[in-house]
Image (cartoon, rainbow, N blue to C red):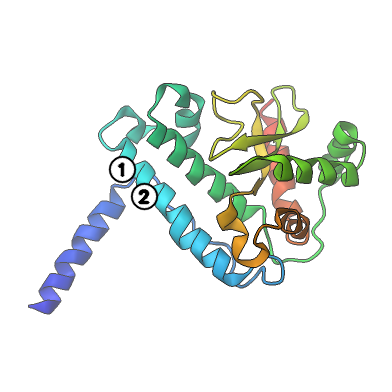
Amino acid sequence: MKILKIAALSAVFAAQFAFAQFKQTPLPYAYNALEGNIDAQTMEIHYSKHAAAYVANLNKAIAGTPQEKQTLFQIMSNVSKLPAAVRNNAGGHYNHELFWTVLTPEKNTQPSAKLSKAIDEAFGSMDAFKEKMSKAGADRFGSGWAWLSVDKNGKLFVSSTPNQDNPLMDVVEEKGTPIFGIDVWEHAYYLKYQNKRADYLAAIWNVTNWKEISRRYEEAISKK
């Protein structure tokens, strides 16, 4: 009897999962892979609790609506006309899916020649860019994100958004295609850094995945 019940529950879960519009991508490294900069406990809670909740709540919010058959890009480009639950959870899902990929345990990754040139043209130097990006994260009051994005003309810009908003949304002032984002919600750093957000922002550069950011940059400019 117990085996039958387990099988029935598994079938229900499998059916729910199969019909879910959006799913979490597996974390591309172990929870402890960024240890020293981002601790394992934070990574596990962040991925398996916070990010998982965004995708689950997004699927719930769009069930039975036209958005159930839309892409995240389509949803976010029209999010001003949608309920807050869709806006918050679509943003939360997209933002975290990007965030995991722009971090890496690989040491000393470097931006591509094209991205390095674009950073120098937009900000003057890599150091100036890092300072501007970190300031965007540090100055964000409350929860939110700092972004490096490509605008409609193919130029780089740094911006910050509140909560789970991002530059793809029609509600933000500075619109573009994000290629790098830093999560500055407290759950992203508080266990290790407590109230020292600046220390967390400094540590991010030790685990930045410039290979992935470069790939995203070249993909974004190819569409302009």
Residue extending farthest front? 195
| Residue plotted at (74% across, 22% down) | 153
Question: Seen in the image, is 6 located left or right of residue 188?
Answer: left
Residue 39 percent across, percent down from the top left: 63, 69
Callout 1 amino acid: Lys
Say which element carries label 1: helix
Residue 90 percent across, percent down from the top left: 45, 39
Say which element carries label 2: helix
Callout 2 amino acid: Ala
Question: Seen in the image, is 85 located left or right of residue 25?
Answer: left
Residue 59 percent across, percent down from the top left: 34, 43
Residue 206 percent across, percent down from the top left: 77, 61
- Of 137 and 65, nearer the camera is 137
Q: Tag 1: Cα neighbours inside 10 Å, few (<14), some, or many (≥20)?
A: some
- Residue designated by label 1: 60
Instruction: Indicate the quadrant where residue 189 lies.
Output: bottom right
Q: Tag 2: Cα neighbours inside 10 Å, few (<14), some, or many (≥20)?
A: some
Quarter that holds the N terminus: bottom left
Q: Are marks 1 and 2 in contact (CB under 8 Å)?
A: yes
- Residue designated by label 2: 56
| Residue plotted at (55% across, 35% down) | 165
